[in-house]
């Protein structure tokens, strides 16, 4: 199943991608669509300013409060508390403010205390944050680029699992149980059970939202990076490298607990990134996560 030719047919269990998208449109998940889409557009436009970002953030009062709270925190050493969004954006930086805004909106749909075996929404969010930070760090340290797209793609990487959790809950529980019993990774069990996997769901949702192709393609191929088009191969491989490194270190929910170490070595070789460099990046990711957890920054802002 390719990203640009996803079929929306129903499977034998009554689920379909089309049905999932319809349900998402009428749920809290749709609330992140506008913010993520507009901020992503700004991050890819060199003419964007703090005022443009402010105009987007102020549409969402709770989000505006979080940005002000973050800019006023001791982490950024502000001279005073901020009550003006544009001043806050200028103080902490345009890119960081944009990332915080996306972080806040996406994390809303990961809230909840539901847990089934080794799965919970909080653990899935922790994994997503780790992938986002790690992918951005890899872009900065190894490629000399800012890595905003890598960060955003990392946060969105497992949206498909959230849709399964919310809208196919009974089937999702069975899939988790079956994966555990058979000692298989999540994706092949999903494909057997539903006819598609969480990567397909995520790609379909991002295409439905009309987000840039780079996001829907890299999200859709994060278990099959060889299917990514040439334009997005590096981004796809980066996400795979960090995702698999997080899985190996047990950071958050593991949807691929059964994998071969040689696969990650091949990805690093294709990226021309040494495993030692990747390990340093992951050390930084774990240190940042520990700080975020100690200050309540996983689901809020520190």
Image (cartoon, grey):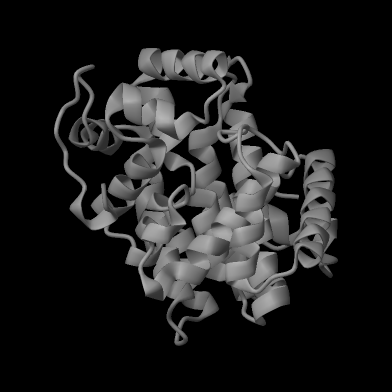
**Closer-to-camera residue (244/116):** 244
Left or right: residue 130 versus residue 75 is left
- State the image quarter where residue 72 is shown: bottom right
Quick one: 89 or 263, which is closer to the camera? 263
* Residue 162 falls left or right of residue 124: left
Residue 196 at x, y = what percent? 30, 35
Residue 265, quarter of the rendered image:
bottom right
* Point 37% across, 59% down: residue: 227
Judged from this view, the residue extending furthest toward the left is 9
Query: In the picture shown, does residue 236 fall above or below 15?
Result: below
> Is 274 above or below relative to 210?
below
In the figure, is residue 302 to the left or right of 272? right
Q: Can residue 96 be seen from the camera position used here?
A: no
Q: How many marks?
A: 0
Is residue 219 among the parts visible in the rendering? Answer: yes
Q: Horizontal and vertical percent for residue 173?
A: 46, 15
Left or right: residue 181 compared with residue 170:
right
Residue 12 placement (x, y as % from top left):
19, 18
Placement of 197 over or under 12, stated as above or below: below
Q: Residue at 26%, 30% (x, y): give it.
A: 23
* Residue sitting at the far bottom: 47
Q: Residue at x 42, y 20 (%)?
A: 172
Q: Residue at x 64, y 54 (%)?
A: 264
For this rendering, which residue is in front, 244 or 160? Answer: 244
């Amino acid at each position: 199943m390719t990203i640009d030719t996803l079929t929306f047919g129903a499977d034998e269990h009554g689920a379909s991608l089309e049905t999932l998208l319809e349900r998402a449109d009428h749920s809290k998940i749709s609330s992140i669509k506008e913010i993520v889409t507009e901020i992503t557009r700004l991050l890819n436009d060199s003419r964007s300013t703090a005022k443009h970002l402010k105009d987007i953030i102020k549409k969402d009062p709770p989000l505006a409060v979080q940005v002000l709270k973050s800019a006023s925190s001791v982490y950024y050493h502000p001279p005073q508390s901020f009550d003006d969004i544009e001043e806050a954006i200028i103080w902490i930086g345009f890119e960081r403010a944009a990332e915080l805004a996306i972080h806040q909106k996406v994390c809303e749909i990961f809230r909840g205390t539901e847990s089934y075996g080794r799965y919970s929404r909080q653990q899935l969010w922790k994994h997503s944050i780790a992938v986002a930070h790690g992918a951005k760090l890899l872009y900065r340290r190894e490629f000399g680029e800012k890595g905003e797209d890598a960060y955003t793609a990392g946060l969105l990487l497992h949206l498909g699992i959230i849709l399964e959790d919310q809208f196919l809950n009974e089937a999702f529980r069975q899939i988790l149980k079956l994966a555990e019993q058979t000692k298989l990774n999540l994706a092949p069990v999903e494909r057997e059970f539903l006819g598609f996997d969480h990567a397909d769901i995520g790609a379909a949702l991002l295409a439905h939202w009309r987000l840039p192709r780079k996001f829907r393609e890299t999200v859709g191929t994060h278990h099959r990076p060889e299917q990514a088009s040439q334009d997005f191969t590096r981004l796809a491989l980066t996400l795979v490298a960090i995702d698999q490194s997080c899985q190996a270190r047990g950071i958050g929910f593991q949807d691929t607990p059964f994998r071969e170490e040689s696969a990650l070595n091949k990805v690093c070789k294709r990226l021309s990134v040494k495993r030692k460099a990747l390990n340093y990046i992951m050390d930084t990711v774990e240190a940042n996560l520990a700080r975020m957890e100690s200050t309540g920054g996983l689901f809020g802002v520190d």
